Image (cartoon, helix red, strand yellow):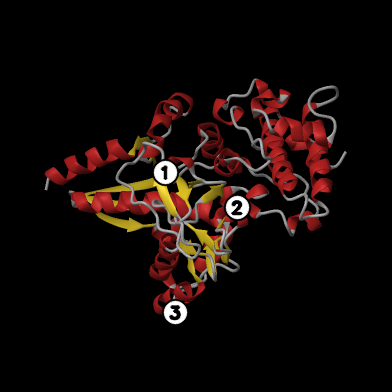
Amino acid sequence: MTQWLSGAWDDPVERAHRVIAAALRAAYAWTVREQRRDAMREVARMTGVVMEAHGPGRGPTTPLDLVACLRQRLGLLPALADGEDETIAQVVLLDRDDRLTADAYDLASEYALAVGGLPESEQWMPAWTRMRADQIRGETFNTLIQSNGQENYVESRRFLIEHPAGSLAELRDLISETGIRPPHRGYADIPADHLHHSAGGARWWWPCPVCHWPMGVAGTTVRCRYRPHAAVYQLTESSKPASRPVLRRVDEGRPHLARPVARTAADARCLSFGIWRFVVVPGVSELRIKKSLEELGAAVELWPRRDRYDLHVYAGGREFRIDVKEYRSPHRLIADLRAKQPTARVLLPKTHEHQLGTLEAVLPSLQVTTETKFCTEVRRALRTI
């Protein structure tokens, strides 16, 4: 048996991780089987990975068996049935139309892992289905670090967060004006399932009101692929063929969010999914927290020493080192914190403050706080001036 199927991998937690990663790859391959001739080969290969992880007589034994499992909760797979991560156990990867679900994009992608992929599949499988978040961030930041100095690094990283999508012309103008160096192949065509095709033939996309990356489009439902960004819309076609379709808010979360306006997809570009999910999404929270702290009166430095940690905060003669952690799966966060000790105090943003109790119970020696608690701490420090 090859090394990537045995040895150090032969651990219940790693086996479960491997099953999730293989299921995610198989789900994506299934959705593009009509466009990629080798997609079914990838589904078959991932079936082999799942079979190995489960052992004889357990779990799906054919590619179609695996696809049937992907339409159900992951927790029904034997390797995950008794797992610690109840959040991931509830995830369904394929919807009734055999499209990737929002949870597949949002949550399961935190479990991406190389599972013996062949060079051919690596050429067409998206990075977020096969690479860990830290690998995607590392590739992105390596390009930014090549720029001269901390200031250029911060400006280049901030540019990606603030301009994750737009027309090719406006992106080129902004890059020219700022002098930043975008990552190689960072901007590409907007994915097909993030576009709406009007009856008149025009194609449209909508920026998420929180992160500004193109929202996913499923029929007439439009929403950000990252669930904590919350907004869900229903689109309505205009009676005039050439007019922009209009969105109507259908959920009750974040009522203050502005309603996005349709933008033409002609010559539009966006950052790759992996860069958006693991650089832009957490970056939006980091910039928002920075702004909130500055409004309180603190001074905040972003990504000191080229991302040794996220925020260096000066308040009332005190200094704070903060590492913002925004994981949808607390189990995945705990595993990563155990694997790599943080160099600063961990901060959970407002959308993830519910994870505090879990982290404190499992990692009692970890220095961890929430955005709300830390803002209170900074206010107190500022009162001492």
Q: In what element is the residue under mark 3?
A: helix
Q: Earlier in the sequence, mark 3 or mark 2?
A: 3
Which badge, 2 or 1, comes first in the chain's sequence? Answer: 2
Dot 2, crowdedness within 10 Å: few (<14), some or many (≥20)?
Answer: some
For image coordinates 48% across by 26% down, the residue present is 362
Q: Would you place residue 107 above or below residue 240 in this image?
A: above
Name which residue lies at 35% across and 36% down.
369
Q: Residue 172 vs residue 30: left or right? A: left
Q: Is residue 308 visible?
A: no
Q: Is residue 321 left or right of residue 31?
A: left
> Which label was assigned to residue 193?
2
Q: Which residue is mark 3?
A: 176
From the viewer's perspective, is the residue at label 3 or at label 2 nearer?
A: 2
Query: Which residue has dot 1 on it?
Result: 231
Nearest to N terminus: mark 1 or mark 3: 3
Tell me the CA gap for discs 1 and 3. Answer: 33 Å
Q: Where 33 falls versus 140 (above or below)?
A: above
Q: Which mark is residue 205?
A: none
Badge 1 amino acid:
Ala
Q: Quadrant of the N terminus?
A: top right
Q: Quadrant of residue 124?
A: bottom right
Q: Is residue 40 left or right of residue 253?
A: right
Q: Position of residue 185 (x, y in %)?
A: 60, 67
- Displayed quadrant of residue 261: bottom left
Residue 44 vs residue 350, the one in the foreground? 44
Q: Which of the pair 183/9 is nearer the observer?
A: 183
Rendered location of residue 367, percent (x, y): 39, 36
Q: Amino acid at mark 2?
A: Asp
Spatial distance from mark 3 to mark 2, Cα to Cα? 30 Å
Q: Circle 2 sits in a helix, a strand or a loop, which is it?
A: helix
